[in-house]
Image (cartoon, helix red, strand yellow):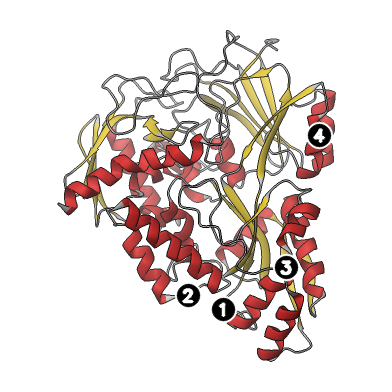
Amino acid sequence: MLRSRFVLLLALCATLVATWVAGCRPAPAATPQPAAAPATGAPAATPSPSALTPQRGGTLTVAVAADPDGLDPHKTVAAATFQITRNIYDTLVQTDEKGRLVPDLALRWAPSADGLQWTFTLREGVHFHNGRLMTADDVVYSFQRLLSPATAGPRAKDFAVIDSVSAPDAKTVVFTLKRPSAAFLSNLAYGWAAIVPKEAADTLRDHPIGTGPFKLVEWVKDSHVALERFDGYFVPGVPYLDKVTFQVITDPAARLAALRTGEVDVIPELPAQDVAAVRQDPGLKMVEVPFNGIQYIAVNNKMPPFDNLKVRQALNYAVDKQAVVDVAQFGIGVPIGSHMPPVTDYYVDLSKRYPYDPAKAKQLLAEAGYPDGFETTMILPQPYDYHIRNGQVVAEQLAKVGIKVKLETMEWGTWLQQVYNGRQFALTAIGATGRLDPEPFLSPYVSTSAENMRNYANKTFDELAAQGSVEADPAKRHAIYAQMQTLLADDAAAIFLLAPLSSVTMQKDVQGWVVYPIDIYDLRTVWKANGR
């Protein structure tokens, strides 16, 4: 009975994902294929770009805030990298704009009755950019590489449930799991599950080779990443664009100026301070949707005085989250109370758990032994202006209860090494984006997780995380993740601030841009009405 219920849950997962996204994203022009049983020979699902007839050709210039930290998909956690590499590499499955899992390199898949084996049938005739045919051996190699300690892949933990990967023949791949995992299939849709060729693995950081719609022309560090259409791409008719350039412009004002002068075509993440003005600009168009992500102040739970629960709770009472939304994000966003965005089906509203109460914050600080407050440091990752503004506003509020915060900006690559990987920080302003299942969104708080940069530790939370990953009953699974969110709030594991709005701004001739529930820029169906 449990086995059949688990398989039922796997089918329901795609439906649940579709439910929470459907309420906040435009309906597609055509109904995508269901995730449970894609038909043999089905084409890779691509969103309908527009009711207009797409034009082929032209160059699209996309303004991005940060340089990628490398183009090897197995060795990064940076959104700035995956936003680009989605167009270079492919994965076994992908998400459509409604969050449903649909075919990519795999035509179809099926779990065993006990949920311990997944069998994938691969698409035939897929080539890497170097001209070689992709086979099941490449899939096996890619996951072995991702999981190898030698790779030191920061996302390897997402696939720690894999016991083995095998290729019975050239178009079949079998994953054997250590235990059933409700999140396994959705994890395959993320950029770090990309399929790569073994012969190019050592040089992927600077010379990526995938099966995706575009291939690398050049990467000039801190300047731009240039791609061109891969004519051997396996989906007929796309991409439409000849070339794509990701132009690094770290200053948000300079990005908007470049858009208005026509130097760039798209700003995928318009700063909140510019939204109101751009809404009134007749020369530009904007797509606005609730964002599948959050912004928060991470707290090092292991570092004194933040190892004291009362101190962490004082931090939360001292912060007026609505003021952070209004001042730091110019009213673009909603307050939250735990590590889950409101657009998800598993969200629990805990935004009132710590009402703004400076007097309560001072009382807790006194009880913790800090009646006069203390001094600390908050690291702000550059060039993410929205995190910097959040940190500045929070620091001003903490000062009112006696906590003097020194603000230190840090280049993104250094931040990844020192803060994310090294856990050498007291406070830092950061965010979390785009997960399709609650398990990987909350599992970074598990005490043994490599992603637990906050050094949070709660035995009950760990036990619930283990239960949630295998629970077959959807209602029970919802209850488990509700408890986990509540524990994070009760333990004041971080200062959970807000869920932002996603605002994509572009020239009026840009067509077919689709916003996805994970943080990617998929340019397969983007085209320019002027053809230039």
Q: CA distance from mark 3 to mark 4?
A: 31 Å
353 lies above or below 328: below
Q: CA distance from mark 2 to mark 3?
A: 23 Å
Residue 203 x, y percent position in the rendering: 50, 41
- Mark 4 neighbour density, 10 Å: few (under 14) some (14–19) many (20 or more): many
Q: Earlier in the sequence, mark 3 or mark 4?
A: 4
Q: Quadrant of the C terminus?
A: top right
Foreground of the two, 209 or 271: 271
Q: CA distance from mark 3 to mark 1?
A: 21 Å
> Label 4: which residue?
256
The local secondary structure at tag 4 comes to helix
Q: Residue at x 36, y 23 (%)?
A: 126
Q: Are marks 2 and 3 in contact (CB under 8 Å)?
A: no
The local secondary structure at tag 2 comes to loop
Q: Which mark is residue 457?
A: 2
Q: CA distance from mark 1 to mark 2?
A: 9 Å
Q: Decide if residue 178 is on the left or right side of residue 70.
A: left
Q: Earlier in the sequence, mark 2 or mark 4?
A: 4
Residue 414 x, y percent position in the rendering: 66, 59
Q: Nearer the viewer, mark 3 or mark 1?
A: 3
Q: Nearer the viewer, mark 1 or mark 2?
A: 2
> Label 3: which residue?
319
Q: Earlier in the sequence, mark 4 or mark 1?
A: 4
> Label 1: which residue?
302
